[in-house]
Image: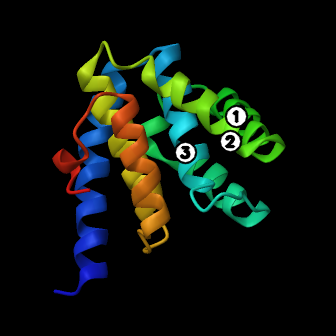
Amino acid sequence: MGFLSKLKEGAMELQSQLVTQVKQFKNKNFADATMAVCALVSAADGTIDATERKKTAAFISSNDMLSVFDVSQLQQTFNTYCDKLVKDFDFGKIDLLQVVSKLKKTPPQARAAVQVAILIAGADGNFDADEKNVIREICRSLDIDPSEFDL
C-alpha cells in the first residue's frame, strides 16, 4: 500500500473516531480552538490564499465531525482567524496559538484538536513539511509531545 493510500485510510479512521469525540466536546473553547487550528494549517506556509481558505471552509461546512456546532458560526470564526493571519501573520499566529492553548487543561479536547489539525492537513492528500511544523507548534502550545502523533 502506498503512502497516500495509507494517509487516506488513516484519515478516514481518524475522522470516524473524531465524530464521536467532538460530540462530547461541544463547547465554545473547543469550537474556537478547532477553527484556530484550521486557520493555522491553512496558512502553514506563511500565507493563506483564497483557494486554501475556500477548501478549508468547505471542509468545515460539510464535515460530519463538526456538525454538532453551528456551521455559520464556525465559518465566521474561521474567517476572523484567517483575517488575523492575513493582517499580521506573526501576531495572528501567536494569538491563534493562545486560543488553542486554552485546551491545555482538558487533554482529551487538546488531543482531539490536534487530530482535527492533522485531518485538515491531510485532506488534500499532501501532508507537507510546513503543515507538520505548524502542527508541532500546536502540540507544544498544548504541552503535548508531537511524537504522540508521529510528528
The picture places residue 7, in percent across and down from the top left corner, at 28, 70
Circle 3: element type: helix
Q: Who's the residue at 23% across and 63% down the image? A: 10
- Going 42% across and 39% down the picture, which residue do you hit? 138
Q: Which residue was labeled with disc 2?
A: 90
Callout 3 crowding tier (Cα within 10 Å): few <14, some 14–19, many ≥20: many
Q: Circle 1: is it few (<14), some (14-19), or many (20+) Cα within 10 Å?
A: few
x, y percentage for residue 115? 33, 44
Q: Quadrant of residue 108?
A: top left
- Label 3 vs 1, first from the N-terminus: 3
Name the residue that disc number 3 marks.
38
Q: How is the image coloured?
A: rainbow
- Residue 40 locus on image (x, y percent): 57, 46
SS at circle 2? helix
The location of residue 95, given as percent across then percent down, is: 63, 27
Front: mark 3 or 2? 2
Number of residue marks:
3
Quarter occupied by the N terminus = bottom left
In the rendered view, does 101 fall on the left or right side of 146? right
The answer to whether the residues at label 1 and label 2 have Cβ atoms under 8 Å apart is yes
Question: Which residue matches tag 1?
Answer: 91
Q: Residues within 10 Å of mark 2 (few under 14, many from 20)?
A: few
